[in-house]
């Protein structure tokens, strides 16, 4: 019997809605990464983008455990000598709450063109509103 490989044109993409309020950052990120990759589908093929769209609301209210708010650091570099900038998780949540979750999910996806394509199907919003009502996303319990 031949192994089934999904073709890019025959993939059915669903939309899921995730409410991140009060959910732990890492646990919600793993569930989202699995949906983006399509790991729960029977037609999962590792080298084809078989994943679904995920809409995340209330990203600013995501929870973390322990002392991560003050000890977890986010780094970026300007490319110039001495251009390293660092922020704590608390500062990052105040300035760019959506990037905290996006960075957590990005670290769980493949590091290639496929992973970058899968990350484009993730839509994150800091508040409770989102512009994707027309797609009728299914609520996803995480």
Image (cartoon, grey):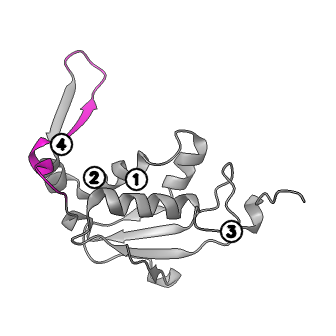
Mark 3 vs mark 4, CA separation in Å:
37 Å
SS at circle 2 = helix
Which residue is depicted at the point 41% across and 58% down? 30
In terms of depth relative to the viewer, which is nearer, 94 or 68?
Answer: 68
Mark 1 vs 4, N-terminal side: 4
Mark 3 vs 2, N-terminal side: 3
Residue placed under numbered mark 3 in the picture: 42
Q: In this orientation, does residue 98 appear?
A: no
Question: The magenta stretch spans which residues?
Answer: 64-82
Which residue is depicted at the point 54% across and 54% down? 118
SS at circle 4 = loop
Mark 1 vs mark 2, CA separation in Å:
9 Å
Which residue is depicted at the point 19% across and 31% down? 85
Residue placed under numbered mark 1 in the picture: 105
Residue placed under numbered mark 2 in the picture: 100
Asked if the residue at tag 4 contacts the one at tag 2, i.e. Cβ–Cβ closer than 8 Å, the answer is no
Q: In this orientation, does residue 83 appear?
A: yes
Measuring from the top left, give residue 71's x and y in whole percent.
12, 42
Residue placed under numbered mark 4 in the picture: 72
Mark 1 vs 3, N-terminal side: 3
């Amino acid at each position: 019997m031949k192994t089934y490989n999904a073709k890019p044109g025959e993939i059915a993409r669903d939309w899921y809605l995730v409410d991140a309020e009060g959910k732990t950052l890492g646990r919600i990120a793993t569930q989202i990464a699995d949906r983006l990759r399509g790991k729960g589908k029977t037609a999962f093929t590792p080298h084809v983008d078989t994943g679904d769209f995920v809409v995340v609301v209330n990203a600013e209210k995501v929870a973390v455990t322990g002392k991560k708010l003050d000890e977890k650091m986010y780094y970026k570099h300007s490319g110039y000598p001495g251009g390293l900038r660092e922020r704590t998780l608390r500062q990052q949540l105040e300035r760019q709450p959506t990037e905290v979750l996006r960075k957590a999910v990005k670290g769980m996806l493949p590091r290639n063109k496929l992973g970058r394509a899968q990350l484009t199907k993730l839509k994150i919003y800091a508040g409770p509103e989102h512009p994707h009502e027309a797609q009728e996303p299914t609520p996803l319990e995480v």
